[in-house]
Amino acid sequence: MGLLNGKVAVITGTAGGQGRLASLAFAREGAKVVGCDLRRLDNEETVREVRAAGGEMWGLAPVDLTDPNQVKAFVREAADRHGGIDIVYNNAGGPRFAPVADMSVEDWRRTISVELDTAFYVTKYAWPYLVARHGGVIINVASMAALIGAPRPPMAAHVAAKAGLAGLTRQLAVEGGPLGIRAVTISPGPIVTREGDLDDVTREMISQRTLLKRWGRPEEVVEVALFLASDRASYITGANIPIEGGATAW
Ligand SMILES: NC(=O)c1ccc[n+]([C@@H]2O[C@H](COP(=O)([O-])OP(=O)(O)OC[C@H]3O[C@@H](n4cnc5c(N)ncnc54)[C@H](O)[C@@H]3O)[C@@H](O)[C@H]2O)c1
């Protein structure tokens, strides 16, 4: 018996990275996974891998989650396929980095849109399905950037978006509590899925910021998300769980 047997889990950003690993882990535990991403071919690869491992997944791509109409259609299709939704895992993200004075207004808006608006849209349209089930779980993937600033790379919009996401989670927990809906933020530190974006010096600097002196693996994030999505975490809501090798502990 899996931890998520029979649960319908909507996961965003499933074309790679943590979203792919989450799809595999949630399906392994018996969830019916519904994924989406901008990237079609990579998303299809995730669906293939989940099914090859004996799991259940349906994926839709391209879906641009910054477009509320596309989100609405995707969420409705997900719910129609499986007769409802139990878990919403807002994982998609994509920051643009620059020092404040050099950050273009467009990059600021794009980061806020991809990293904050998208989670609101998915949650908003999924909410009535969770209510209809008399309960459910929303997991929002923020970042240690929701807890501290960072000198390198400079990330004003990312910090603002992820801190906003943690705030949104708390409000969802307040509104969801009486309805049996839990909402939890997870805040990963440096995870190897994005390590390639940075130069060697920055990578090492970030590594040294953690107490474990290394970048994390995506499975180290999704196994926590899996627990939080399960009934074993039935008394956890509104919290922000850091998964960052201790980087924010000092
Ligand atoms: N990797 C890290 O170091 C790190 C650290 C802290 C937080 N996070 C967060 O973890 C989450 C997963 O990131 P990841 O490490 O797997 O990186 P990733 O870039 O591999 O995954 C993000 C996914 O979101 C998708 N996406 C982006 N914009 C989209 C849109 N408009 N519509 C649909 N899909 C879209 C991308 O195509 C991609 O597949 C993100 O929210 C990220 O901010 C990552």
Image: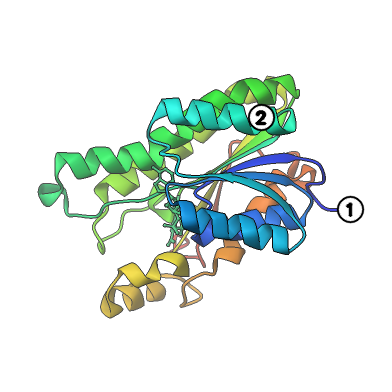
Query: Does any portion of residue 69 appear in the rendered image?
Result: yes
What residue sits 51% from the left and 75% below the top? 212
First of labels 2, 1 by sequence position = 1
Judging depth in this view, the residue of 209 and 34 nearest the camera is 34
**Quarter location, residue 132:** top right
Amino acid, disc 2: Ala
Q: Is residue 17 left or right of residue 239?
A: left
SS type, badge 1 = loop
User: What residue would you read off at disc 2?
Assistant: 79
Q: Position of residue 59 (x, y in %)?
A: 59, 46
Mark 2 closeness class: few <14, some 14–19, many ≥20 residues within 10 Å: some
Q: Is residue 207 left or right of residue 176?
A: left
What residue sits 32% from the left and 39% below the top? 112
Mark 1 closeness class: few <14, some 14–19, many ≥20 residues within 10 Å: few
Q: Position of residue 129 (x, y in %)?
A: 66, 24
Amino acid, disc 1: Met
Q: Position of residue 156 (x, y in %)?
A: 25, 48
Image mark for residue 1:
1
Q: Is residue 236 left or right of residue 244?
A: right
